[in-house]
Image (spheres, helix red, strand yellow):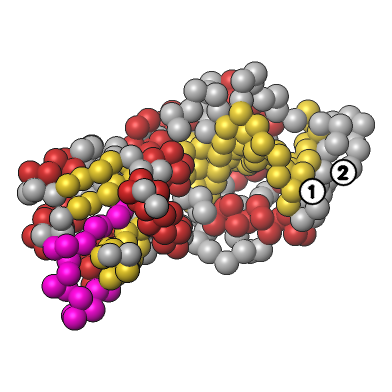
Amino acid sequence: MTERENDEKWMRRCLDLARCGRYGAPPNPMVGAVIVHDGRILGEGYHARCGEAHAEVNAVRAVREADKALLSASTLYVSLEPCAHYGRTPPCAELIARLGIRRVVVGCVDPFARVQGRGIAMLREAGCDVTVGVLEAECRELNRRFITCQTHHRPYITLKWAQSVDGFLDRRRTGGQPVALSSPRTLMAVHRLRAQSGAILVGHATLRLDRPRLDVRHWAGPAPLRLVLGRVAPDELPEGFEAFADRDAMLAELYRRGVQTLLVEGGARTLQSFIADGLWDEARVELAPQTLGDGVAAPAMPAGAQRRVETHFGRPVVWYRRAGSLL
């Protein structure tokens, strides 16, 4: 096995570990770290919760006392550049240098303004042999939400809707219940997506017509912030909801609060406005088997959007990625 192949093997382990922090780490990135000596793992860890120990610290803590003398002859693998600043925790790059770990392999550079290569520079100045960019595409993909938020100063925006086989979201109506296009099982998948989002948004027309709860009652996980876009009278706004009349002001406020992800669930005009202005990163479209014949047309995706089809509980789900995405 070449050195590159060996590095990729351990970086894959870092990625597996990092995914364990999918619910607790945001708005921080998901990060995994592994310390290896002569093909044996001395310690490994991941960033479990925002404000708590980083992956590198947890990996060092996992090293047995009998193995600590081997650290200076070991390689540390980490999926994201070690931090170089004092935040809620001390700099990981400083810890690694102090331990004398001779080689560090980094998946990708951290785009956070207080890092951006400073951690790598700190390690090299301390005499560490640093390799950067092992499985870089996979590492960036894992933290695409964090990277987008740091680069564009807005949340990572996912659009979501279900449409009939003939391309409608619902029948045209002035009251009553919407057509149930999602099945009980695909509804669970939607609520899982909600639990992975920092905030969820509908337009004011959807609020008035459907009175949606926008919660995660069909999945275990944290409930997102519930937002309405448009002018809504105070007596129309359900408890726990926030209303924003201006979309750009809303996105700026979410970024200020550290909200990394926004799920937009509709209605049709709201979804299409995000698409038209290029303010989206992914879209999840469930294709239901019903035929409506007429009604509220589903949003139109732009030419050039990347597209892949998956099957969720027997139903096709189309995932789109915006053309020109930074990932």
Q: As displayed, is residue 98 above or below residue 142?
A: below
- Residue where numbered disc 1 is placed: 315
How far apart marks 2 and 1 lie (CA) works out to 8 Å
Which amino acid type corresponds to the residue marked 1 in the rendered image? Arg
Q: Is residue 77 magenta?
A: yes
- Kindly tell me whether residue 21 is visible in this rendering: no
Residue at the extreme bottom of the image, as rendered: 66
In percent of the image, x 52 and y 54: which residue is there? 196
Q: Is the C-beta separation of discs 2 and 1 under 8 Å?
A: yes
Which amino acid type corresponds to the residue marked 2 in the rendered image? Pro
Asked which secondary structure carries label 2, the reply is: loop
Task: State which tag comes first along the sequence, 2 or 1.
Answer: 2
Q: Position of residue 114 (x, y in %)?
A: 19, 41
Image: magenta residue range:
62-79
In percent of the image, x 18 and y 80: which residue is there? 65
Residue at the extreme front of the image, as rendered: 1
Image quadrant in which the C terminus is located: top left
In front: 114, or 273?
A: 114
Given this view, does label 2 or label 1 mark the residue nearer the observer? 1
Q: As displayed, is residue 16 above or below residue 286?
A: below
In front: 92, or 153?
A: 92
